Amino acid sequence: MSQFELAYRVWLDKHIAESRGERRRRIKERHGFGEKSLLEHAWWPVIGNLDDICPEYEFVDSEGNHVFMDFAYIRLPKPTCLESDSFGTHARDADRWTFSRGLDRQNEIALAGWNVLRFSIDKLKENPEACRKHLRTMLTNWYGSDEAHVLELNLYQREILRLATRSSEPVTVDTVRQVLGRSDRFAREQLHQMVENRILEPASGHQRIRSYRLRRDAR
């Protein structure tokens, strides 16, 4: 068994164990050939690990709809949505409503401050090196040496970052407190540190900030 296959099985089992509800079902039933091809033929040869990339990442759009990305690469200064598309699913078999909804979905993700990269399964099979080139360019342009200020986040701040990237709406102190399972004061301390480190910015309030969002200049 290859090194990739071993790492892939451990990674997939970990995300299945940690997920719940619709996301868990999608990982088990819909994470298939195309998604694995992206990891095996493009991601793994360039990155060399599966750290910080999450399958079937749940995102709540501005209308409260829950949508799922094939993969989310959670890294500062701006997360990236990666999709593996088959021609049949996204072109030949799509009716007008499905096609329109697909465009709306991508627009919602982009407008919420995400990078978006899409790969065709045919390209992954026939010309994987071209896909790797796109990933290398992604690393250089979006996560290059000029982003050396990218910080090591503690466990709680990583969870806050995931929370902030999951929704198009600002995150509130109360939501962070509930997700972390800690006190209001602790939640505010973590959020304040992330503001000082130029990861988040206030979204409402002045003297007492009530909600936060990813910094606009980090998007």
Image (cartoon, helix red, strand yellow):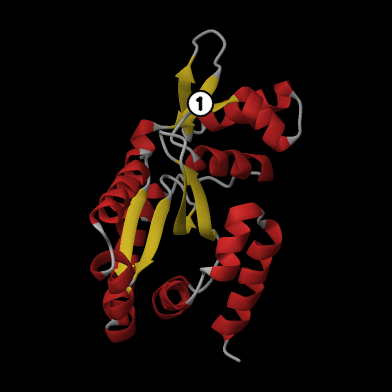
Q: Nearer the viewer, residue 165 or 95?
A: 95
Image: 65 above or below 116: above
Quarter in which the C terminus is drawn: top left
Left or right: residue 161 compared with residue 111: right
* Amino acid type, residue under disc 1 in the picture: Tyr
Left or right: residue 129 compared with residue 168: left
Q: Is residue 136 visible?
A: no
Q: Is residue 77 visible?
A: yes
How far from the left and from the top, in percent, is residue 211? Answer: 53, 22
Q: Nearer the viewer, residue 203 or 68?
A: 68
Q: Nearer the viewer, residue 187 or 100?
A: 100
At 67% from the left and 54% from the top, the residue drawn is 20
Kindly give the residue lying farthest to the top in the view shown: 207
Kindly give the residue lying farthest to the bottom in the view shown: 1
- Write down the residue under mark 1: 212
At 51% from the left and 37% from the top, the residue drawn is 164
How far from the left and from the top, in percent, is residue 68? Answer: 47, 53
Kindly give the residue lying farthest to the right in the view shown: 182
Residue 145: image quadrant is bottom left
At 26% from the left and 50% from the top, the residue drawn is 100
Q: Secondary structure at mark 1?
A: strand
Image: 123 above or below 110: below
Residues packed near mark 1 inside 10 Å, few (<14), some (14 to 19) or many (20 plus)? many
Left or right: residue 215 compared with residue 20: left
How far from the left and from the top, in percent, is residue 29? Answer: 56, 69
Quarter in which the N terminus is drawn: bottom right
- The number of numbered badges drawn on the structure is 1
Image: 193 above or below 2: above
How far from the left and from the top, in percent, is residue 116? Answer: 33, 54
